Every structure is written in C-alpha cells, then in structure tokens.
C-alpha cells in the first residue's frame, strides 16, 4: 500500500474528520487483508453463499 500525504483541511473539525476517515480506511484495509472483514448478509445471499430466509 502506497503512503498518501494527508489531505489538506482548513479547520480543526474538518481535519479531525479527514484523519478519522483515513484511519478507518486503513483499519478496513488491514482487516480485509487478514480476511477478517465480512460482507453483509444481503451481499452473501446475492452471491449464493447464504440461503434466503423462507417467506
């Protein structure tokens, strides 16, 4: 993963939001790389991995 410079933000609240978003993305990428991030049930259903609930 290539390191990207942080986005410019003009304001502490905006800056904190950008930092939090970047940290969350990195955590997601790390979890996905380890295979720990699971997709939602509807996606798995569409992919045929989880049977649909009976009506």
Image: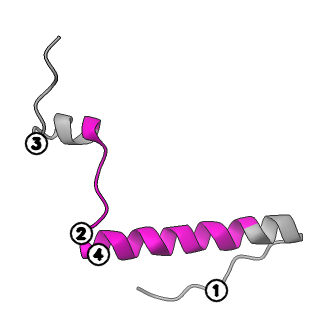
Q: Main secondary structure of the magenta part?
A: helix
Q: CA distance from mark 2 to mark 4?
A: 5 Å
Q: Which residue matches tag 2?
A: 35
Q: Are marks 2 and 1 in contact (CB under 8 Å)?
A: no
- Is the C-beta separation of discs 4 and 3 under 8 Å? no
CA distance for labels 2 and 1: 27 Å
- Horizontal relation, residue 42 to residue 17: left or right: left
Q: Secondary structure at mark 1?
A: loop
Q: Nearer the viewer, mark 3 or mark 1?
A: 3
Task: Decide whether residue 23 is among the magenta residues.
Answer: yes
Question: Do the residues under discs 2 and 3 have CB atoms within 8 angstroms?
Answer: no
Which of marks 1 and 4 precedes in the sequence? Answer: 1
Range of the magenta residues?
17-42
Location of the C terminus by quadrant is: top left
Residue 10's x, y, as percent? 88, 71
Please rate how many residues cluster around mark 2, counting C-alpha atoms within 10 Å: few if below 14, some from 14 to 19, many from 20: few
In magenta segment, residue 53: no
On residue 33, which mark appears? 4
Look at the picture and state if 3 lies above or below 49: below
Mark 2–mark 3 distance (CA, rounded to whole Å): 16 Å
Q: Residue at x 87, y 71 (%)?
A: 12
Q: Residue at x 84, y 65 (%)?
A: 13
The image quadrant that residue 20 belongs to is bottom right
Residue designated by label 3: 49
Question: Can you tell which mark lies on residue 5?
Answer: 1
Badge 3 marks a residue whose secondary structure is loop
User: Residue drawn at (20%, 42%), measured in percent from left and top?
Assistant: 44
């Amino acid at each position: 993963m290539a390191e990207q410079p942080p986005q410019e933000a003009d304001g502490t609240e905006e800056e904190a939001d950008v930092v939090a978003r970047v940290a969350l993305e990195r955590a997601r990428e790390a979890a996905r790389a380890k295979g720990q991030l699971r997709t939602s049930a509807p996606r798995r259903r569409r992919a045929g991995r989880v049977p649909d609930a009976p009506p």
